[in-house]
Amino acid sequence: MTKKHPEVREVVERYYATVADLAASPESLGRLLAKDVTITERPNPITPRGSVRGRKESVTGFESGKTLLSEQEFIVHEILVDNDRAAVRATWRATIGEAAGPLPAGTQLLAHVASFLTVRDGVIVEQESFDCYEPFGPA
């Protein structure tokens, strides 16, 4: 039987809202991540080899994204919670603000995201994401 843990849902909702907010501070993200968090991004067109990041690398990546993107949003379609685990289905939309490698400014990014998170003591201790990108295109 699935158990409901409203604090897990709350943390996950705050996490996605913070990540999507280009005005959010790195400290606001840091407060949602355990000191020993592991964030795994499976291979995709933006990160072809995938990545495994800790807290410091995740916050640094968050800051870098804020300079690269002119806008972004996460639309969370559903969050399924069982004990300290959450499964999330979301859509991520963003626009490249300044050219980055082969992606010119104005490129629209759209990814359908499945993500699995573990929350303990009010912070995320683990996340694994699978991002399926639509073909890139101009704004």
Image (spheres, grey):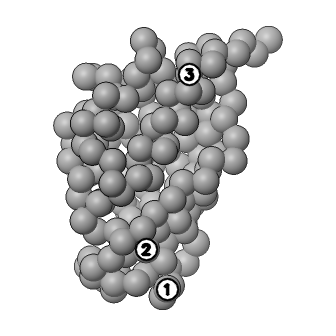
Locate residue 8: give its quadrant: top right
Say whether marks 2 and 1 touch (CB < 8 Å): yes
Give the vertical position of 64 relative to 85 (above or below). Answer: below
Which comes before the other along the chain, label 1 or label 3?
3
The residue carrying mark 3 is 8
| Image coordinates for residue 137, horizontal then vertical, percent | 50, 84
Is residue 45 shown to the viewer in this render?
no
Tell me how far mark 1 sits from mark 3, CA to CA.
Answer: 35 Å
Give the vertical position of 1 relative to 8 (above or below). Answer: above
Q: Residue sitting at 62 percent across and 47 percent down?
A: 76
Q: As drawn, is 51 to the left or to the right of 89?
A: left
Say whether marks 3 and 2 touch (CB < 8 Å): no
Which comes before the other along the chain, label 3 or label 2?
3
The local secondary structure at tag 3 comes to helix
Residue type beneath disc 3: Val
Quick one: 38 or 63, which is closer to the camera?
A: 63
Quick one: 28 or 132, which is closer to the camera?
A: 28
Q: Residue sitting at 49 percent across and 85 percent down?
A: 139
The residue carrying mark 2 is 95
Which comes before the other along the chain, label 2 or label 1?
2
| Image coordinates for residue 132, horizontal then vertical, percent | 57, 60
Is residue 34 shown to the viewer in this render?
yes
The residue carrying mark 1 is 139
Q: As drawn, is 63 to the left or to the right of 41?
A: left
Residue type beneath disc 1: Ala
Give the vertical position of 52 relative to 63 (above or below). Answer: above
